Image (spheres, grey):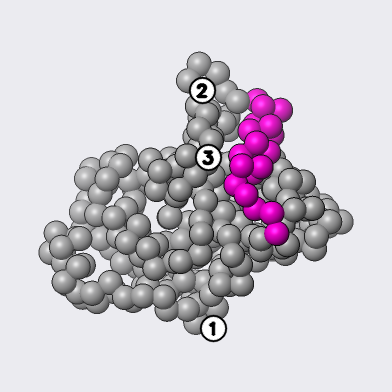
Amino acid sequence: MILAVGRKERAIDKKEFEGLCEKAISKCQLEGKRILAIIPDSTRTVPMPVLFKALCNSLSQEAKKLDFLIALGTHSPMNDQEIDRHLGINKEERKGPKNVEIFNHRWNSQKELRKIGLIPREEMRKLSGSLIDKDVPVLINKRIFDYDQLLLIGPVFPHEVVGFSGGYKYFFPGISGPEMVNLSHWLGALLTNPKINGIEHNPVRELINRAASFVTIPSISFCLVMRKNRVQGLYVGNPIEAQE
């Protein structure tokens, strides 16, 4: 784990959170790298303005490239005004000192996707408790292959489909093709909500982590614990370890 800070009695205020973000980033050894930060859209509760500015300020001189990809899943693309509001920036600040680019994921655009693997039928039967009996192709936004470091940023909340959000969920279904979007939700429905929601280890999370094993680009997760709009914790490291 690169950084692990949690507060039960009090929230982490903005100044402390900024310092923690900068400390974590400095420990990630990102100098000279092409970095893609995969971030939530505005439907998720997370202090993206602080995170966005911390990343830009910390990496503007060290990273070779820094861009952001919004993990929409099947949500509608965000327009420029929505993105600016989500990140707490204006038009002039959008590109920053290193020409930062911000992209929407488009799950239904085949030209933006690449197949990176296949989960075979036998493995799917075992993983799903015989609920799914077919080969599952694994497709992901091909933009990730233009970078040599991925940052997965988002909150960890109880979730009705995967048990808890965060971690590799920002790959699948966050920036995946329709196959993983549909399958993860269908498997969650077959298992039923009481056996998924708030359950740390479950077949849907196992499916997501298995699909993520096909992604060979190094990845670091910034997982936040939120209480309403207040930050209670920040855990940075391997996506599985940080999310758990």
Residue 2 visible to the viewer: yes
How much space separates mark 3 and mark 2, taking CA atoms? 17 Å
Q: Which residue is mark 1?
A: 111
Disc 1 is placed on an element classified as helix
- Is the magenta region chiefly helix, strand or loop? helix
The percent coordinates of residue 21 (x first, y second) are: 64, 38
Disc 3 is placed on an element classified as loop
How much space separates mark 2 and mark 1, taking CA atoms? 44 Å
Q: Is residue 28 left or right of residue 107?
A: right
Question: Nearest the camera: 206 or 32?
Answer: 32
Q: Which residue is mark 2?
A: 7
Residue at x 28%, y 41% (from the top left corner): 199
The magenta stretch spans which residues? Answer: 13-32
Residue at x 61%, y 72% (from the top left corner): 146
Q: With respect to residue 96, does 232 lie above or below?
A: above
Mark whose residue sits in front, 3 or 1: 3
Callouts 3 and 1 close, C-beta under 8 Å: no
Residue 73 visible to the viewer: no
Q: Which residue is mark 3?
A: 2
The quadrant in which residue 120 appears is bottom left
Looking at numbered disc 1 in the image, what kind of residue is underneath it?
A: Lys
The percent coordinates of residue 225 (x first, y second) are: 49, 34
Let me know if residue 207 is in the magenta part: no
Instruction: Tell me which numbered mark, 3 or 1, is placed earlier along the sequence.
Output: 3
Mark whose residue sits in front, 2 or 1: 2
Q: Is residue 205 left or right of residue 107?
A: left
Residue at x 78%, y 49% (from the top left corner): 89
Q: Quadrant of the C terminus?
A: top left
